[in-house]
Image (tube, helix red, strand yellow):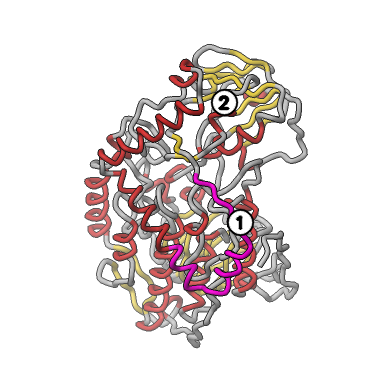
Amino acid sequence: MTSEALPIQRPVDPASPGTSDVPSGPSPRHSRVAVVGAGFTGLAVGLALLRRGVHDFVLLERADDVGGVWRDNTYPGVGVDTPSPLYQLRAMTNPDWSDLYAPGHEVQDYARRLARSTGLLDHVRFDADVLSARWDAADARWRIATPSGEFTADVLVSAAGLVADPKLPDVEGLAEFPGPVFHSARWDHDTDLTGSRVAVVGTGATAIQLVPELQPRVTELHVLQRTPAWILPKPERPVGERTRRTLAANPLLCRMQFDVIYVGAELLAATRRSRLLREALTRVGRRHLAAQTPDPQLRARLTPDFDYACKRPLVSNDYLPAMSAPNTTLHTGGLARVEGRTVVSGDGSRAEVDAIVLTTGFEVGATAPIARRIHDAHGRSLHDHWGAYPRAYLGMSYPGFPNLFLMQGPNATSGASSTLLFSEAQARYVADAVCRMAAEGIRALDVKPAVEERWTRRIRRRSARTVYETGGCASYYQNDEGVNVVMWPANTAEYQLRTRRFRLSPFDVERGRTGAGARLPSLRPVRLATTA
């Protein structure tokens, strides 16, 4: 196997679900299942459906390629910040990582191979951004509007992604800046920053990778930091060709490698509750900072004043040296305003720059565009129902939205282990639900309000005891009131256990032989290879 780019070849048959040249006509195209997004989570749903013999589904993708966040993020230095063997689907492992922390293009190549080798590409509709989706109670189906026309589906699965839509700061004067301004997730490859004076706004996971790449290329680098992050040494380790060939020939070894790294990641994730472990890792972070930042004043400004793991912990061996470079200036207090070509930070410092790069995160939870686009039968969106408190039973089901499943929804993802473990668990659960509906003639499923309320109360109690809420920071995990509405507050194994099979008892059930209640014409489970 190689990590060279594998171009997507779109199907040319206009009747195929994979082409964006859809047939014209007054009737919307109907599928048993419609999945929003063809990133890794959407692909995981498709794989789970195929494995259960469900072939009548479509992946509605707004762009012209699969891969989601790895298609969108092409900034210099992009790569995984969790060990590569964790960043893969267990149903289709990848033995071809070149490093323990793989570069972004290898992850995107893996997504392309996955879609192509499994036949999932034939189920993708490209250029099909979901503008709105509304539950039709009379017909028991979802009506989905896209630029490519209307689709309908018995079951709607939102795999739009946790970090899909860039969050742009509302800063005075930014819109009038005369030079290039762009978010890291929409990198402008036509702009050459070499020799320029560049401001990087933000110091999160993206900036940690981007700053060391920009620093040697630019004349001046101005980093506008709102809050520093805890940074640990990055155990980079190239993987030789011989090892990769051995892993490719022995899928069991891939699984064993995954399991070993998974156990280590889950032990580190225990920092959410263990103060002793947080203190131990804090000492590692302080030693790393001291070793790489000789200037005591700069070191003090780069030292967080909150608990380890309250915000997302980061790993890097070259960010701190780049921050100590002569052409780098740290500004604290974030970006306060822009005056012509001058950026002004919260600490009052000023710098004249030629370009501004925003590493300001993404719209998450209730602010994500997809939450405003999915509507109940009365036209109220998920955002309208949630307000500042996104919530859902198992992070997937919310009352009043029948036959809807949210992937990596509220409190159903991980910031420490692999998010794809949650994606696969949820995908299996959704596929089980679809088959159960077909087998028992179920037209519509709607989670009971009392069930969702009990679940949410339990999550709130458990989250309140985690570092996500007690660690003294503000993060994208939290809503404006400091409540964790993003992260799962326990270990990944517990979530996998809770979603191991679909249960009917938490749901109000409407039976019938139309829509989702119609039996599947045939269940033809697909046997897939274990490596992509």
Percent x, y for residue 291? 47, 28
Percent x, y for residue 330? 55, 20
State which quarter of the image contains the C terminus.
bottom right
The one of 346 and 325 positioned closer to us in this rendering = 325
Local secondary structure at mark 1: loop
Labels in figure, total: 2
The one of 95 and 515 positioned closer to us in this rendering = 95
**Is residue 272 positioned above or below 523 on the image?**
above
Sort mark 1 into few (<14), some (14-19) or many (20+) by Cα contacts within 10 Å. Answer: some
The one of 208 and 458 positioned closer to us in this rendering = 208
The one of 322 and 32 positioned closer to us in this rendering = 322
Q: Main secondary structure of the magenta part?
A: helix
Percent x, y for residue 144? 55, 61
Q: Amino acid at mark 2?
A: Met
Local secondary structure at mark 2: helix
Q: Residue at x 37, y 82 (%)?
A: 441
Q: Which residue is mark 1?
A: 98
Is 168 contained in the magenta span?
no
Which of the two discs, 2 and 1, sits closer to the camera? 1
Sort mark 2 into few (<14), some (14-19) or many (20+) by Cα contacts within 10 Å. Answer: many
**Is residue 381 positioned above or below 212 on the image?**
below
Q: Which residue is mark 2?
A: 323
Q: Residues in magenta?
A: 235-258
Is 254 contained in the magenta span?
yes
Q: Residue at x 49, y 87 (%)?
A: 522
